[in-house]
Image (cartoon, rainbow, N blue to C red):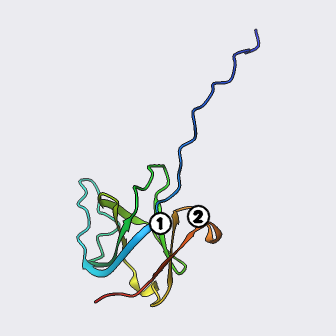
Amino acid sequence: MSPDISKPVRGGTRPSWDLPEIRDIQIRRVSFRPPERRNFESSLARYKEAVEFLVSTDGPVPARALGPALFVGDVKVIESQKVGENLYRFLVFDSSRLRSGAPISWGWISDQKGERRVTRFRYELNQ
């Protein structure tokens, strides 16, 4: 048996996973209709409304295995989707956990408190 003497494969530059800056956040209560599934019921089927965070950024969120998250105080908001160019929608279904005036931070789902980017925004629900 001969040893493997091949040279290591050179990788390209690592992609940047820096999140863009948040320009604006619009917060409001919205009606919610869960996605229809063919073979099972969505775990979100019990919800009829949510608190929506419409987040405008100064650039696109990089695509990677882990998604972006908003942190409202200590509440992690991970239910999200892209809705336009540099525009993202985050939803919270249990609004009782959100505290008025709580600071809003920005990061990846797995980010710990010290890794999150603090924003100038605070949680205030616009009725």
Tell me, yes or no, if residue 92 can be seen here: no
- Residue highlighted by disc 1: 69
On the rendered image, what quadrant is the N terminus found in?
A: top right
- How many numbered marks appear? 2
The quarter holding residue 55 reads bottom left
Label 2: which secondary element: loop
- Mark linked to residue 111: 2
State whether residue 28 is above or below residue 40.
below
- The residue that appears at 57% across and 33% down in the rendered structure is 12
Going from N to C along the chain, the mark reached first, 1 or 2, is 1
**Amino acid type of the residue that numbered disc 1 sits on in the rendered structure:** Ala
The answer to whether the residues at label 1 and label 2 have Cβ atoms under 8 Å apart is yes
Q: Residue visible at 53% across and 48% down? A: 16
Q: Nearer the viewer, residue 125 or 24?
A: 24
Q: Is residue 124 above or below residue 44?
A: below
Mark 1 Cα shell of 10 Å, populated few (<14), some (14-19), many (≥20): many
